[in-house]
Image: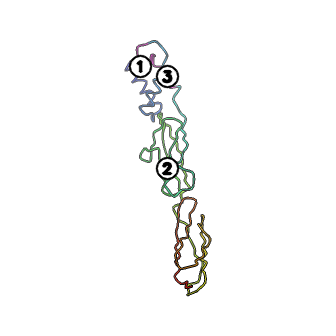
């Protein structure tokens, strides 16, 4: 039986040169004529059926992401194929780590050698901290309370203003949706009551 199997493998490989070893093996073993024979498949190889059932369709894949929410961390995109594949770029890895927003195209083949691609796109990485702006306030000696106001360019601020009744410090903290935070400390030393 070995010469016949080798001959069928050669015939299949000449028909589709991109066949991988596993693709050849699976095509031959999955297309036997069922018999009660003392062999691995329990059947006899069938060249016509094997050639008729050669996979000619390109493999497809979707991409899953470690998070879709706004984040200040890296995002991992993982290929989810429709069948067994071999990734032909990215060091043969089915995962790609984004350190910044962008796109990456996975290229891959199925076991028959059909080529496919899937593009991963990430737009939810934000590693830029918000900016806190402190409004002008009294810096000359005074016997009055001093109110300091602050704003941020994005996210939320822990307080829009703070009233000093005595000398001291206050931290305005801005936090954006991705978790980036900025602290702006105001120190008052000019109150004399």
- Give the alpha-carbon distance from disc 3 to disc 1, as whole Å: 13 Å
At 58% from the left edge and 78% from the top edge, which residue is drawn? 165
Q: Nearer the viewer, mark 3 or mark 1?
A: 1
Tell me the SS state at disc 1.
loop
**What mark, if any, has residue 40 been given in the picture?**
1
Q: Indicate the quadrant where residue 21 lies.
A: top left
Q: Nearer the viewer, residue 170 or 20?
A: 170
The residue carrying mark 2 is 76
Q: Are marks 3 and 2 in contact (CB under 8 Å)?
A: no
| Mark 2 burial class by Cα count in 10 Å: few <14, some 14-19, many 20+ | some
Give the mark nearest the N terminus, 2 or 1: 1
Q: Nearer the viewer, mark 2 or mark 1?
A: 2
At 51% from the left edge and 29% from the top edge, which residue is drawn? 54
Q: Is residue 177 above or below residue 104?
A: below
The residue carrying mark 3 is 31
Give the mark nearest the N terminus, 3 or 1: 3
Q: Name the residue at the front extreme.
A: 193
At 45% from the left edge and 36% from the top edge, which residue is drawn? 18
Relative to 7, is 123 on the left or the right? right
Q: Which residues are magenta?
A: 37-51
Magenta run includes residue 48: yes
Tell me the SS state at disc 3.
loop
Q: How many marks?
A: 3
Quarter of the figure with the N terminus: top left
């Amino acid at each position: 039986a070995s010469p016949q199997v080798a001959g069928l493998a050669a015939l299949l490989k000449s028909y589709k040169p991109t066949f991988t070893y596993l693709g050849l093996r699976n095509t031959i073993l999955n297309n036997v004529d069922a018999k009660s024979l003392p062999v691995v498949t329990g059947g006899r190889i069938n060249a016509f059926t094997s050639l008729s059932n050669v996979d000619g369709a390109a493999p497809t894949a979707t991409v899953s992401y470690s998070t879709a929410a706004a984040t200040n961390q890296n995002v991992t995109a993982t290929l989810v194929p429709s069948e067994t594949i071999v990734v032909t770029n990215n060091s043969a890895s089915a995962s790609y780590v984004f350190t910044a927003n962008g796109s990456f195209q996975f290229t891959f083949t199925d076991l028959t050698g059909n080529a496919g691609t899937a593009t991963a796109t990430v737009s939810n990485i934000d590693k830029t901290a918000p900016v806190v702006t402190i409004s002008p306030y009294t810096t000359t000696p005074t016997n009055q309370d001093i109110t300091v106001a602050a704003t941020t360019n994005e996210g939320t601020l822990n307080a829009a203003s703070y009233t000093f009744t005595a000398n001291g410090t206050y931290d305005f903290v801005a936090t954006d949706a991705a978790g980036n935070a900025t602290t702006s400390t105001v120190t008052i030393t000019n109150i004399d009551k």
